[in-house]
Image: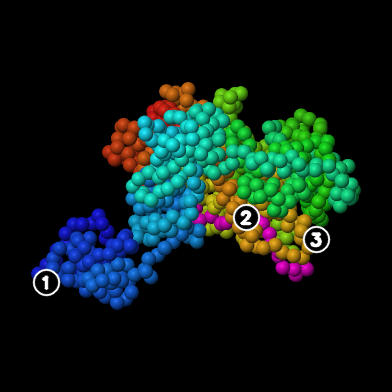
Amino acid sequence: MGRKNKQKRKGNSGGSTVKKSVLRSEIMQVFRESPNKQFNYKQLAARLGLTDPESRKTVIEVAREMADLDLLKQPSTGKFTLHPSQIAVIEGVIDFIKSGAAYVTVESSKEDIFIPASKTGLALNGDTVEVSITGGRRGKPEGKVIRMVNRNTTEFVGVLELSQNHAFLVPSNNKIHTDFYIEKNRLNGAKNGEKVIAKILDWTDPKKSPFAEVVTVLGQPGDNDVEMHAILAEFGLPLSFPDNVVKAANDIDVNISQKEIDSRRDMRSITTFTIDPDDAKDFDDALSLRSLGEGTYEVGIHIADVSHYVKPGSILDQEAVKRATSVYLVDRVVPMLPEVLSNYVCSLRPNEDKLCMSAVFEISENGTVKKEWFGKTIINSDKRFTYEDAQAVIEGKSETFADEVLRLNRWAEQMRKDRIKNGALEFSGTEVKFKLDENGKPIGVYQKHMKEANFLIEEFMLLANKRVAAHVGRPKKDKKPRPFVYRIHDTPDPEKLKTLRDFVSRLGYKLESIKPENASFALNNLLHQVKGKTEEEIVKQMSIRSMSKAVYSTDNIGHYGLAFDFYTHFTSPIRRYPDVMVHRLIHDYRHSDKNPSIDGLEKTCKHSSNMEKKATDAERASIKYKQVEYMIDKIGDVFDGSVSGLTKWGMYVELTDSKVEGMVPLNTIDDDTYRYDEKTNTIVGARYKEVFEFGDKVRVEVKAADLILKQLDFRLV
């Protein structure tokens, strides 16, 4: 019983009706809600709604007993506070929601801690905080932020609102629940209405705005470059390379010496080609194929040898570690490496000698791997295919390297079938793309579908990643596994699978098992059930939400989604730092018995996983911005869609053709009063009991488009 329950609870003439065991629990709850406060017995009784003398007497008796048991502490006679041993302090990362409340995610627990808006203290979204548990609601823990341990970022993007004597920064990110006060002498030339980056200077009172100063003026909202730069800054991602990094890249000696060639396996005479998207500039993987006779073939999976040019500890390496990944926004790539490296020196461009780290396999006619070799090579690609070019070969519309492409495709199809048979999940599908004009404005939206050419590349990259990981992680001759960087994917949470099972059952489908060991087969069966149906994409999205997130780690637990016991990232070092680490380890282990620091590897793994998430969030934000920009001139138009999310303030709807998502606020549905039911994850009308749930087909009108908030408002038709 807490602060809100102040109704009087009178005892009768026979004495107090309050049991000591119950009272002890209620007193402990009061102190957990206010772990740093002192209360006397009168204040405790008032908190508990106890007014009769007998009950008050029992309160002081119980409080003293609790002090004797080291549950409470008596700093002075008659006053009590929570004993230090009873203050549960937990560290985690805080994630705010629209209302201003938040959840703290704790690494060691699957259950998040709810933090009411009034108890978030001086924390901002993404900060690492210390939380004390103050109670619970609906069986879930509730807490209070007692200390901000580490700021996620000190710089924030927003629009400047200038008055005569001062200004406020209104953050673009709606998870930042406060604005920032900026004195006039700290504007750095910024003007009213401009989008800027501000740095927090001081914040001591959660009831007041933090003090900040403008550090970068981005420009006018709505300008494409301004908005893309704002998205990068919002997620703490770099806008450009420092001058010394660019200089270091430009100073690299790109000449390949004969000594270097002699130290590598020379594969320049073998038929080799790349297959990439039509707009790609960094070609970091190539395939080679030649016959060895007697039904055996040599397949080379060649990956750009970034580690040859980016040495450990160098300026280039330090910058690559910090970035950890390339970032793919709708209209641009923010590379991990300077352009001279990513697009020229390392890129496996056709008809140029290129240094590679390769996985070379001897494969039989039926696709069985008979031998494997991993090491440094030199190649010369004969052809640059786009996915469309390679698909034309597969479909018999082109003869360019047809024997090689068709043979590789047959093996890829078999490998894919075998993976799925072993329990790999089938989640590949469509991708939303924009047609942009010369100013970056979206003039069309289309969906890109995975075809055989995509799967061909995917399967051979998976083969290399899997065999490289097993090569180190499962050594021969009774040797111990050496420290390595794995890409791991944990088993799904049975509770999330149960939620998925309940959801699809309402659609008339069955998820046969929620046990992790059988779930992948059950999920694939479910996806086959809905294939081609109108609810296919909704079920696929809900299934993905039930999965854990893949991360980098030195602790190998396997990759659940791919059904691999060993898996790593080896194939994209131009755009992922963990791949560079893997290349170095493979090379070093061929030439040395010395092991690197596993703590150092793990630290970089965690940082890379964190940066990968930021890059993904930034990509989604850029897509959201372009979707809103695309819909600005469609106010009043009506579209078909389906319910893609449900909250207490509204219903999210994804439009069928464009995959654009917007929200129908509940207070705009005027045929009834609607409420969100958390237990069933549905929205229900109070009077007529009409129910909306995830996946329902609806028709909506576009009512408003807010580019600053990246938000679309729909009205239910």
Quadrant in which the C terminus appears: top left
Label 2 or label 1, whichever lies nearer to me, is: 2
Residue 489 is covered by the magenta coloring: yes
Q: Residue at x 70, y 44 (%)?
A: 574
Name the kind of residue labelled 3 in the image.
Answer: His
- Do the residues bearing badges 1 and 3 touch, measured as CB atoms within 8 Å? no
| Observer-nearest of 242 and 361 | 242
Q: Does the magenta stretch include residue 40?
A: no
Q: How far apart are marks 2 and 3 (CA)?
A: 23 Å
In the image, is 69 to the left or to the right of 611? Answer: left
Sequence order check, earlier mark of 1 and 3 = 1
| Label 2 packing within 10 angstroms: few (<14), some (14-19), many (20+) | many
Q: Position of residue 209 (x, y in %)?
A: 38, 44
Q: Mark 2 points at which residue?
A: 604
Task: Please report the bounds of the magenta region as a residue range.
Answer: 476-498
Examine the rendering and report whether any part of residue 595 can be seen.
yes
The kind of residue on which mark 2 rests is Thr
Q: Which of 231 and 641 is in front in this view?
A: 231
Please name the residue that numbered disc 1 is placed on: 14
Q: Residue 473 carries which label?
A: none
Task: For mark 3, give the secondary structure.
Answer: helix
Camera-side mark, 1 or 3: 3
145 vs 531, nearest the viewer: 145
Q: How far apart are marks 1 and 3 (CA)?
A: 87 Å
Label 1 CA crowd tier, 10 Å (few <14, some 14–19, many 20+): few
Q: Residue 200, image x and y in percent?
A: 46, 45
- The amino acid type of the residue labelled 1 equals Gly
- Which quadrant, please, contains the N terminus? bottom left
Precedes in sequence: disc 2 or disc 3: 3
Q: Name the residue under label 3.
A: 591
Secondary structure found at label 2 = helix
**For residue 416, side relative to residue 633 (left or right):** right
